[in-house]
């Protein structure tokens, strides 16, 4: 093959697209990833930061999904041992809750059984006194006891970047800030000519792909219609596959001693309090959006912020006296279904449209399963052989520690992790966005490194600092204004 020919061109640089590129590259396939923004700017950096089977999916009877996810929980944690850790979660039992002690015990027992050989510390049940001892901040009124079980907490964005680095180390081409502009079939070779343009310099890049993979998450419906319109002019738009939903999280100072919490909200929905990087992530919501989401639908709403603040204060009264330090939201690429959006399936689906493969649905924990399924489907179409292998024993390239040397950290991220802005460095390559000052000091220290490495003049460097500081200021103002009226 020449330097433009690829077996796969993958559209989308989230965990799904990067996982596909990694599997394909490790199989020796030439593969390119095109991402119009930075890597993992969508749902892959806006999760609850959990590798889990999904305890709440047991109520929906999705036992095979839970079993699969629990197996992958261990595999993914082995891939990224420094970016994941086991955490004990407490499920408080209260008078009047729809889930009582026997039902919770049965659910946790089933959760342990479905984990099988990959099970972690088994669940235990605690009485009210023991629960208060373990987590003194939990509301005691109506507390009858608690169940405790173990799941994994991970750094979603940095883990996905590590997947990208592994894909690149095995030959994948990762192109960020590069937008698809055209695609057309080449009948003489049977390939698809894919043209893209870099958003910074405006350079045109051409790759000739045997298959194009649409892994654009919540934007997959639009991408599918657009690419098919290019490859098959005159064809009608395909039916939509997605029913996306927005999930919002608030970030608080640490609210618990050492446990995560899984609670039933006042409306019967499940809420999480997840300990991460010395903070507590409180989520999540389920707000249906359009497919593709409108730009305004990507941002958390005031109603969601108030809802989460109210619910966490109901369970942890001290939270009522605290102010969240951050808020973030992501759009889940859920499959279209008749169920309520909060009960929609987390399984994935692969759709073939000639030379275009679209993958939708799924959850972060099972990204390896999704990648293997997609590459296996592509191998059958291309008549290539892929030897399945369990790579969980081979750790991904790990980032340097999140230490105080901001300049050295920036050098590494620019050189090895495709970072090109302060937002990339602070929000998606580190946990500096969770510092008391939201990473403002670190950003000022790292901006000169970006300027020197990318050839910025003083004006461009100042614009970058101003843009980052404005985004932090706007987020904090939104929190202040929203919660002032609670």
Image (cartoon, rainbow, N blue to C red):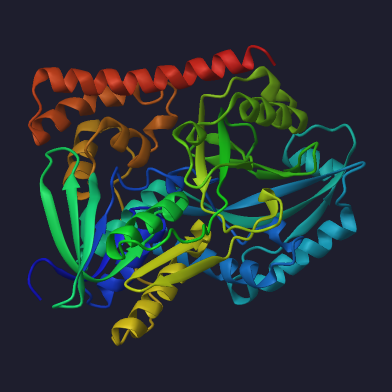
Instruction: Kindly tell me whether residue 98 is visible in this rendering.
Output: yes
Q: Residue furthest front?
A: 234
Quadrant containing the C terminus in the rendered view: top right
- Give the image location of residue 93, x and y in percent: 84, 46
Residue shown at 69% from the left, 60% from the top: 57
Eyeballing the image, is 305 above or below 207?
above
Q: Which quadrant would the N terminus be assigned to in this image?
A: bottom left
At a point 47% along the width and 70% down the height, the residue shown is 350
Q: How many marks?
A: 0
Q: Determine the residue positioned at 22% across, 55% down.
A: 182
In the image, 220: left or right of 362? left
Q: Is 177 situated above or below 405? A: below
Give the residue drawn at x 20%, y 73%: 191
Q: Position of residue 459 (x, y in %)?
A: 13, 17
**As drawn, is 46 to the left or to the right of 275?**
left
* 71 vs 208, nearest the viewer: 208
Residue 176 seen in the figure: no
Query: Based on the displayed image, in which of its 4 quarters is residue 390 positioned?
Result: bottom left
């Amino acid at each position: 093959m020449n330097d433009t020919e690829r077996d796969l061109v993958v559209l989308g640089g989230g965990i799904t697209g990067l996982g596909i590129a990694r599997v394909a590259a490790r199989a020796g396939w030439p593969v390119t990833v095109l991402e119009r923004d930075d890597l993992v700017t969508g749902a892959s950096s806006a999760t609850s930061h959990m590798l889990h089977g999904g305890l709440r999916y047991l109520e929906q009877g999705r036992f095979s999904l839970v079993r699969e996810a629990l197996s992958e929980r261990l595999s993914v944690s082995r891939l990224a041992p420094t970016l994941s850790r086991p955490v004990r979660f407490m499920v408080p039992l209260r008078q009047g809750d729809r889930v009582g002690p026997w039902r919770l015990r049965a659910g946790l027992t089933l959760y342990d059984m479905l984990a099988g050989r990959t099970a972690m510390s088994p669940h235990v049940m605690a009485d009210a006194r023991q629960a208060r001892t373990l987590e003194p901040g939990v509301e005691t009124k109506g507390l009858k006891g608690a169940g405790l079980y173990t799941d994994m907490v991970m750094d979603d964005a940095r883990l996905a970047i590590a997947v990208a680095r592994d894909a690149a180390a095995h030959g994948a081409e990762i192109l960020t800030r590069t937008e698809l502009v055209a695609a057309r079939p080449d009948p003489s070779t049977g390939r698809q000519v894919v043209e893209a343009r870099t958003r910074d310099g405006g350079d045109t890049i051409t790759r000739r792909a045997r298959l194009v993979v649409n892994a654009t998450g919540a934007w997959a419906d639009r991408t599918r219609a657009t690419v098919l319109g290019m490859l098959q002019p005159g064809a009608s738009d395909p039916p939509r596959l997605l029913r996306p939903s927005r999930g919002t999280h608030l970030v608080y100072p640490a609210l618990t001693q050492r446990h995560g919490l899984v609670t039933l909200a006042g409306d019967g929905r499940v809420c999480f309090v997840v300990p991460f990087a010395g903070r507590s992530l409180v989520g999540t919501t389920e707000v249906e959006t359009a497919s593709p989401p409108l730009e305004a639908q990507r941002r958390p709403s005031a109603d969601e912020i108030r809802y989460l603040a109210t619910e966490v204060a109901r369970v942890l009264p001290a939270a009522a006296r605290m102010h969240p330090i951050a808020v973030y939201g992501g759009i889940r690429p859920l499959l279209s279904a008749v169920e309520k959006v909060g009960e929609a399936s987390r399984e994935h689906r692969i759709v073939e449209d000639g030379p275009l493969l679209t993958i939708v649905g799924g959850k972060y924990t099972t990204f390896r399963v999704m990648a293997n399924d997609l590459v296996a489907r592509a191998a059958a179409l291309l008549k290539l052989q892929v030897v399945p292998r369990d790579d969980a024993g081979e750790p991904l390239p790990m980032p340097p520690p999140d230490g105080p040397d901001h300049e050295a950290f920036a050098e590494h991220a620019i050189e090895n992790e495709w970072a090109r802005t302060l937002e990339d460095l602070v929000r998606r390559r580190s946990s500096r966005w969770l510092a008391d000052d939201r990473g403002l000091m670190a950003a000022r220290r790292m901006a000169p490194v970006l300027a020197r490495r990318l050839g910025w003049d003083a004006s461009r460097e100042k614009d970058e600092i101003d843009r980052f500081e404005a985004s932090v200021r706007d987020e904090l103002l939104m929190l202040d204004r929203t919660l002032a009226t609670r």
